[in-house]
Amino acid sequence: MTATAPCDELTAILSGPDPRPALWEAIDSGRMAELVPELPALRMEQDPIHRHKDVLAHTVAVVGKTPDDLVVRLAALFHDIAKPRTRSYEHGGVTFRHHEAVGARMTRRRLTELGYPDDIVNDVSELVRLSGRFKGYAEGWSDSAVRRYARDAGHLLGRLNTLVRCDCTTRNRGKAEALQRQVDDLERRIAELAEADRRAAERPQLDGEAVMAHLGIGPGPAVGEALRFLLDLKRREGELPDDEIRRRLDEWWLSRRGGAAPPPTHADVR
């Protein structure tokens, strides 16, 4: 009988509509201490003075809120894994400085030892590293900060936002709803900025020099109008052959001039 690989066992524990019962069973039986020795150490109070939630209970709750996506669930399982290692007390409070970066390295080592493939190891480790990036959004982010967040997340953007949404286990309904609205706002801004950047990067197939040479005109408002016509044409129909672009430009120029024939171009003169 072939033994189950450690990565397959952990994947099975995290699978299904609600992974929390299987996860707690693995923790309470001691099996999770064998698979992920760092996890039981999360059974601590973040701040014993003010008795903030214990990190293990929070972690299991976050995993339970995630969709059945292995990468997201592994990231939820490991997102606070470095808190015991990075916990310190300063000025009467508790801090976990750089726990995401430390956690990403711990995650990479543990997932590799468990036998997960490189793509899963890389994606989960990166999500753990980025898991705290959303903090501070409520205080106001510039457009450049929003672009940087999206750029750094890359292909993991959707999963990162899902992790951020799930990493909210407060019983304060107002705080929970506020966080969801903030993520909604961030996603809206990302989409709007991406569309603005896409349009700003668009160029018509002919530049101003080519338009003036083809139509036999000099600089002036007509060149800008022609470029706007060509850009709109590209948006509607995509890239067209050069001769078709010039034919369409001639038709537009003819209609703009009220039916007068366009002036000859250098190519028309034989």
Image: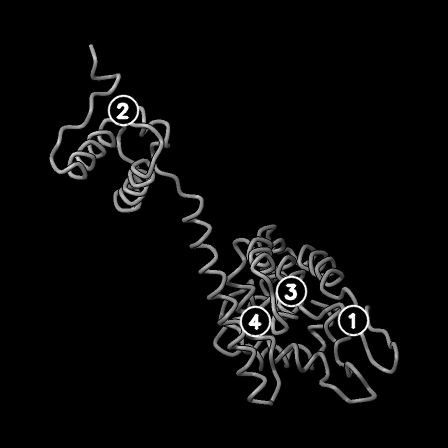
**At label 2, which amino acid type do we have?**
Gly
Residue 125: % across, % down: 65, 58
**At label 3, which amino acid type do we have?**
Arg
Query: Does the residue at mark 2 contact the one at mark 4 (Cβ under 8 Å)?
Result: no
Residue 74: % across, % down: 60, 66
Task: From the image, state whether disc 3 or disc 1 is nearer to you.
Answer: 3
Query: Does the residue at mark 2 contact the one at mark 3 (Cβ under 8 Å)?
Result: no
Could you give the CA–CA distance between mark 1 and mark 2, rounded to whole angstroms? Answer: 68 Å
Could you tell which of marks 1 and 4 lies nearer the N-terminus? 4
Looking at the rendered image, the quarter that the N terminus falls into is bottom right
**At label 4, which amino acid type do we have?**
Leu
**At label 1, which amino acid type do we have?**
Phe
Residue occupied by mark 1: 96
**Mark identifier at residue 133:** 3
Could you give the CA–CA distance between mark 4 and mark 3, rounded to whole angstroms? Answer: 25 Å
Could you tell which of marks 1 and 2 lies nearer the N-terminus? 1
Task: From the image, state whether disc 4 or disc 3 is nearer to you.
Answer: 3
Could you tell which of marks 4 and 3 lies nearer the N-terminus? 4
The one nearer the camera, 168 or 245, is 245
Label 1 Cα crowd, 10 Å radius (few <14 / some 14-19 / many 20+): some
Could you give the CA–CA distance between mark 1 and mark 4, rounded to whole angstroms? Answer: 26 Å
**Mark identifier at residue 82:** none
